[in-house]
Image: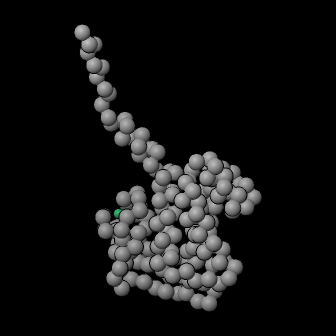
Amino acid sequence: MAGMRYAPCGMCKQMTAHNVVAVEDRSSEEGSDVYYFLTCAGCRCVSMANQYNSVMGIRAFLEQLMILKVGDQGTFEANLDEFLREGYISKMHRKAMSHILDSGHAAIHRMHKPTEEDLNIALDITEAITAAIYFHESDAKSVAERVPPRTPRPPKV
Ligand SMILES: [Zn+2]
C-alpha cells in the first residue's frame, strides 16, 4: 500500500516524511491497532510504526508536556489554563489543544474512533506546539549565534 506518513527517523534525528511500504491493520472492537512498515524519504532508513488508539496517545503526550512545564494543576483544563498563563501557548493553541483533548477523551470513554484525517490534524497541531516549545527557542538562539556582530558606526563629525 502506497502513501506517506510523518514519523520520527532514528538516522535523521527528526520527524521526516516516510514512504509507507506495507500496512498491517490489527484493529478490533477494543480499538484501532495499525502497524506501518516505513522507509524514510530522506535517508531511506527502514522503520516500523504502530498506531494504537493514537488520539489517546496524543492526549497523554500533551498532558505530560504540560505537567513537565507548569506542574500538575489537577485537571486537564487547569493544566491548559496554566500553560496559557505561563505563555507556552497562545489562546489559539489552547482552543486547538482543547479540541484534541476532547477527541482523546471521547476515544477513551465513548469508543469514539477518530478518522485518519482527525489523527493527522491532531498530530500536526501537537508537532507544531512541541516544536515551538522545545526546538524553536534553541534553533533561534543558534541563528543569533551565527550573526556577525555589528561594527560600531564612526562618530559623526
Ligand atoms: Zn531519515
Question: Most extreme residue toward the front, as rendered?
Answer: 157
Q: Decide: is 73 above or below 98.
A: above
Name the residue rendered at 65%, 78% in the picture.
106
Q: Residue at x 66, y 55 (%)?
A: 81
- The number of numbered badges drawn on the structure is 0
Q: Colour scheme in the image?
A: one colour
Query: Residue 90: percent from the left, percent from the top?
Result: 55, 54
Q: Position of residue 50 (x, y in %)?
A: 50, 76
Relative horizontal placement of residue 10, taking residue 107 as reference (left or right): left
Q: Residue furthest top?
A: 157
| Quadrant hosting ligand 1 | bottom left
Would you say residue 124 is visible in this rendering? Answer: yes
Residue 80 in the figure: left or right of residue 24: right
**Quadrant where the N terminus lies?**
bottom left
Q: Nearer the viewer, residue 147 or 44?
A: 147
The answer to whether 144 is drawn above or below residue 70 in the figure is above
- Which image quadrant for residue 142? top left
Side of 73 where 1 appears, left or right: left
Residue located at (40% from left, 73% from top): 5
| Residue at the (31%, 26%) spot, across then down | 150
**Between residues 143 and 53, which one lies in front from this camera angle?**
143
Q: Position of residue 66 (x, y in %)?
A: 62, 55
Q: Is residue 15 above or below residue 54?
A: above
Dividing the picture into quarters, in which one does residue 155 lie?
Answer: top left
Residue 91: image location, x then y, percent: 57, 56
Q: Residue furthest right?
A: 74
